[in-house]
Image: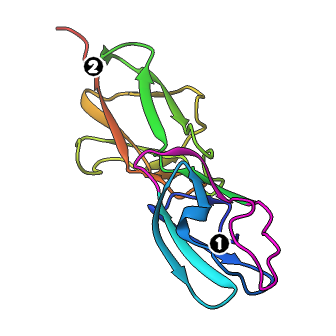
Amino acid sequence: ILTEKELTNAETISYTIVFNEKVVGFTKEDIQIENGTLKTFKQEDETTFTITVTTEENQNNTQVVTIKEGTCTNQIGNSNKKVTNSIIIDRVKPTASILSEEGSIAKNHTITITLSDIGAGLSENNIYQYYVSTKQDTLEGGAWTDFEPEKAFTIGEGLTGTYYIHVKTISDKAGNTLDAVSQGFVLDNIAPQ
């Protein structure tokens, strides 16, 4: 049983089943699937079959495909052995939280950005950056700045008003993407009169 990847976030996964000689009596009922649903079964030639198996939204586990023992035979009646292959399914997006130690209004905010992924883990190719913007939906008035996840940093020096921290898009190892995330904070650096 062959498949292209060991880890995927695909809705449908293709497998190729190759016997070392011509078999008789192999059908889709001879295939056992754990954590998926058989969608298609096709005989390509005397020794090769292809199947597609679907996954579920937010699935995060291992899909196992097994050809049961003794379900088909070669030309002289020898039965097949049990064969299994598996693939890790990760269809869960990473998550991000942006928290301030000071609460909603402060002169300066001590910010911690926490990123996590309950599936395959975060991609090594992510660039961790934030942007302090005067707008919730667009980037305005700032610049992208590097940060380390879960390491606090301070914003707000000399700023007054509502500002939004935008975190750049991140991905996990399976290719699931968390779109840019933002959180608003109020800064007050004006002395009372």
Q: Is residue 145 magenta?
A: no
Does residue 162 appear to the left or right of 113 in the view shown?
Answer: left
* Few, some or many residues within 10 Å of mark 1 (<14, 14–19, 20+): few
Q: Report the quarter where the C terminus lies.
A: top left
Image quarter of residue 11 = bottom left
Image: magenta residue range: 55-83
Nearest to viewer (mark 1 / mark 2) = 1
57 versus 155 height, above or below: below
Does residue 145 appear to the left or right of 150 in the view shown?
Answer: left
Q: What amino acid is found at the position of numbered circle 2 in the picture?
A: Asp
Q: What amino acid is found at the position of numbered circle 1 in the picture?
A: Glu
Q: Report the quarter where the N terminus lies.
A: bottom right
Measuring from the top left, give residue 146's x and y in whole percent. 55, 45
Residue at 60% in and 62% down: 31
- Front-lying residue, 72 or 21: 72
Residue at 40% in and 13% down: 102
* Few, some or many residues within 10 Å of mark 2 (<14, 14–19, 20+): some
Residue at 62% in and 44% down: 121
109 versus 66 height, above or below: above
| Type of colouring | rainbow
- Mark 1 / mark 2, whichever is N-terminal: 1
Q: Secondary structure at mark 1?
A: loop
Q: Which residue is mark 2?
A: 188
